[in-house]
């Protein structure tokens, strides 16, 4: 894994310190309450979930919906320079859909407190998981599995369609901000197990995005470090495979103990 954390991820981890709330803006709350339509697609969220599930062409080639389903606080547009590298098109955190509104802090609190909205966020997550060839087996632990029928085609699309890597970063940040960060480890470790045990989702592009961006989109520092260690072990081939069995065991352990990592034994502690 790269030691450097990209600027957008650092700002996410720091909870966007330069962001200010605008109480007059509530477009995202209204959309997730099913009271207003997203633009430019002009759909209520419940209709989008129903009509677009399994419509992979729409999910691949339309782009404006992402800023509505996976909402983020805004970050300032910089001059595009980071670590001495100039990026020609610096993108604000809320994305390139100018018909969407950056998430507001008062919306975050209202959305997290509304069980119906939280369930809609889960449906948004399931929508894109299905698009990527995955399914959510347990919404409490975040455990994922391959889709039942078409996972091979969907995995192949993900390896070839790199714009989805930016989407995944956005999804993970959004889940964290809306109180569902427990799902992030489930996603990251599922991909790692697929790479390590089966050689799936193991292109250079996915590894680069995963190691530098996705794996850092976890605000829980202990979990972020442990996930990073597992990724390094696989990349450096130090400790063998990260298997499906190890994946499910880590999530089970966290459910029971609150931690992904195993507790150190008395012998380990003495050493």
Image (tube, rainbow, N blue to C red):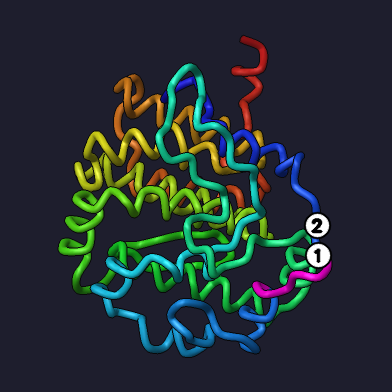
Instruction: In this rendered view, identify the residue nearer to me: 120 or 137.
Output: 120
> Badge 2 is on which residue?
21
Q: Is residue 32 magenta?
A: no
- Does residue 255 appear in the picture of this structure? no
In the image, 73: left or right of 229?
Answer: right
Residue drawn 59% across the image and 62% down it: 71
Residue 208 occupies quadrant: top left
The answer to whether marks 2 and 1 mark residues whose Cβ atoms lie closer than 8 Å is yes
> Badge 1 is on which residue?
106
Crowdedness near tag 1: few (<14), some (14–19) or many (≥20) residues, C-alpha within 10 Å: some
Instruction: In this rendered view, identify the residue nearer to me: 88 or 31.
Output: 88
Q: Is residue 116 above or below residue 95?
A: below
Name the quarter where the C terminus is drawn.
top right
Location of residue 127 in the rendering, given as x and y in whole percent from the top left corner = 41, 73
- Does residue 147 appear in the picture of this structure? yes
In the image, 269: left or right of 241?
Answer: right
Instruction: In this rendered view, identify the residue nearer to me: 87 or 249.
Output: 87
Q: Which residues are magenta?
A: 23-28
């Amino acid at each position: 894994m790269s030691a450097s954390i990209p600027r957008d991820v650092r700002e996410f981890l720091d909870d966007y310190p330069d962001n200010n709330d605008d109480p007059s803006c509530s477009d995202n709350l209204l959309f997730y309450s099913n009271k207003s339509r997203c633009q430019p697609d002009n759909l209520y969220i419940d209709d989008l979930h129903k009509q677009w599930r399994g419509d992979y062409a729409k999910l691949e080639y339309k782009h404006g919906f992402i800023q509505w389903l996976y909402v983020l606080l805004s970050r300032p547009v910089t001059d595009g320079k980071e670590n001495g590298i100039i990026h020609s098109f610096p993108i604000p955190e809320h994305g390139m859909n100018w018909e969407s509104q950056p998430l507001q802090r008062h919306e975050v609190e209202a959305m997290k407190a509304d069980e119906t909205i939280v369930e809609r966020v889960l449906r948004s997550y399931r929508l894109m998981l299905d698009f990527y060839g995955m399914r959510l087996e347990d919404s409490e632990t975040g455990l994922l599995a391959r889709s039942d029928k078409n996972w091979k085609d969907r995995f192949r699309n993900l390896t070839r369609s790199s714009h989805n890597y930016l989407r995944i970063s956005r999804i993970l940040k959004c889940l964290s901000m809306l109180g569902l960060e427990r799902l992030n480890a489930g996603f990251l470790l599922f991909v790692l197990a697929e790479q390590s045990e089966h050689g799936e989702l193991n292109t250079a592009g996915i590894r680069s995005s995963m190691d530098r961006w996705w794996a850092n989109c976890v605000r829980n520092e202990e979990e972020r470090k442990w996930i990073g260690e597992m990724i390094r072990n696989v990349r450096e081939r130090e400790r063998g495979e990260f298997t499906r069995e190890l994946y499910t065991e880590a999530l089970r352990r966290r459910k029971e103990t609150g931690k992904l990592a195993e507790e150190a034994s008395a012998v380990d502690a003495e050493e």
